[in-house]
């Protein structure tokens, strides 16, 4: 297969870059539209006050001659272009360092998206359990413990379903399959990894990361990505192939490590591109714009429009609970992508499991 040129490689993902730009720009427009709807209230001007327009046409700062109105109008296109540029730069660096030029990570991701039917059922069950726990009002009773146990089981059972040869080799993973036992050895390797990795990651992010300069911190983060890529490659391979030993010879292939590294990096980056814009827009509106708007309605003894109440509720939920649904989504996607990469890299063994 002929290797793609640099520009052909980037051109293949043009639709993805465009969608990321449009989504980020749309979220910026939400912020702009909300501000413009309540521009007088937010900035403390009387409705129709000419001083408001004088304020907009004033310079942004003493050193920047651009007017505030121009900067305001440029916000959406600047955010959109920035989102696309970050993705393009990272993709370009992966190409230049010869990391997963075949974009197997993307093929694995697209394959995992075909599991949307079982994912919706799985996620809906998690959501119901979460809502039941919320209804308990913070009380830790039998119902809360049962729901928490079922939540842990639902999260933990996914690799038992996905990481087997039949599942990762199918064209469309659109149905639940029976959980399969991977063998005590594969399970032990995974347990050892988590026992070692989790304390180190917690220590690094909670303590050490605050004392590192930006460049060193960035390099440490990438080393962390490589560490997780190596661990995922070795453990998932042992799990899928029901191997009794870790095949460290897999690390001799730059392609194997690079593909798992690219998956970790790009899936995280696209997750940020998808969720960061709406969450940031909602946070800015709730923290800096809404207090002024609510005080105006209270001062005038008026009720807020129903659409505004609904919008506030949606933004409140998004800001308050994004850290709950994001890990669940990433858990499902990563487990599926890891399993599929073993198949795409040709690491699924066709022979029978090893005998003692």
Image: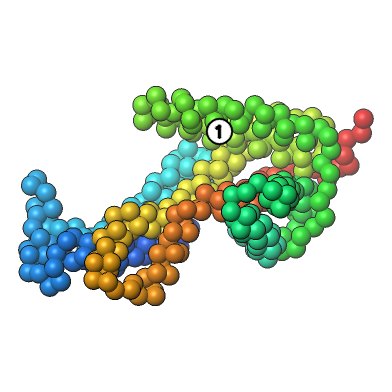
Residue 325 x %, y % = 56, 54
Residue 346 showing in the rendered view: no
Residue at 56% across, 45% down: 263
Picture mark count: 1
- Report the front residue among 291 and 31: 291
Q: Is residue 308 above or below residue 78?
A: below
- Report the front residue among 152 and 119: 152
Q: Is residue 51 left or right of residue 342?
A: left
Q: Is residue 104 above or below residue 110?
A: above
Q: Is residue 247 left or right of residue 320?
A: right
Q: Is residue 306 above or below residue 267?
A: below
Residue at 61% across, 31% down: 198
The image quadrant that residue 17 belongs to is bottom left
Residue 121 x %, y % = 69, 63
Q: Secondary structure at mark 1?
A: helix
Q: Which residue is mark 1?
A: 226
Which quarter shows the C terminus? top right
Q: Is residue 204 above or below residue 50?
A: above
Residue at 53% across, 26% down: 203
Residue at 40% across, 64% down: 312
Q: Is residue 57 left or right of residue 219?
A: left
Residue 356 showing in the rendered view: yes
**Residue at the extreme right of the image, as rendered:** 356
The image quadrant that residue 127 belongs to is bottom right
- Report the front residue among 295 and 279: 295
Residue 90 x %, y % = 43, 45
Residue 329 x %, y % = 59, 53
């Amino acid at each position: 297969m002929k290797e793609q040129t640099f520009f052909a490689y980037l051109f293949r993902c043009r639709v993805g870059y465009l969608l990321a730009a449009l989504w980020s720009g749309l979220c910026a427009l939400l912020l702009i539209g909300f501000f413009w709807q309540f521009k007088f209230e937010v900035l403390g001007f009387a409705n129709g006050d000419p001083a408001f327009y004088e304020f907009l046409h004033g310079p942004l700062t003493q050193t920047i001659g651009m007017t505030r109105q121009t900067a305001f109008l440029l916000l959406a296109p600047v955010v959109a272009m920035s989102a696309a540029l970050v993705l393009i730069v990272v993709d370009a660096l992966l190409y230049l360092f010869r990391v997963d030029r075949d974009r197997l990570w993307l093929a694995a991701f697209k394959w995992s998206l075909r599991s949307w039917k079982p994912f919706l059922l799985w996620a809906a069950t998690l959501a119901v359990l979460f809502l039941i726990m919320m209804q308990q009002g913070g009380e830790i009773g039998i119902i809360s413990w049962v729901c928490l146990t079922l939540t842990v089981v639902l999260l933990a059972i996914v690799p038992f379903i996905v990481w087997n040869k039949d599942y990762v080799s199918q064209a469309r993973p659109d149905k639940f399959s029976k959980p399969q036992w991977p063998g005590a050895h594969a399970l032990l390797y995974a347990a050892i990894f988590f026992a070692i990795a989790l304390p180190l990651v917690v220590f690094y992010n909670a303590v050490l990361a605050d004392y590192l300069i930006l460049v060193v911190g960035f390099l440490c983060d990438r080393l962390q990505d490589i560490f997780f890529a190596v661990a995922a490659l070795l453990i998932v391979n042992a799990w899928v192939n029901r191997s009794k030993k870790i095949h460290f010879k897999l690390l001799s292939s730059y392609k194997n490590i690079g593909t798992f590294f690219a998956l970790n990096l790009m899936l995280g980056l696209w997750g940020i591109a998808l969720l960061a814009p709406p969450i940031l827009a909602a946070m800015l509106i709730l923290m800096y714009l809404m207090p002024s708007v609510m005080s105006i309605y209270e001062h005038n003894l008026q009720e807020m429009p129903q659409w505004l109440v609904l919008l506030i509720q949606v933004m409140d939920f998004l800001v308050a609970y994004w850290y709950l649904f994001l890990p669940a989504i990433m858990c499902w996607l990563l487990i599926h992508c890891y399993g599929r990469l073993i198949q795409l890299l040709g690491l699924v063994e066709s022979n029978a499991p090893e005998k003692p």
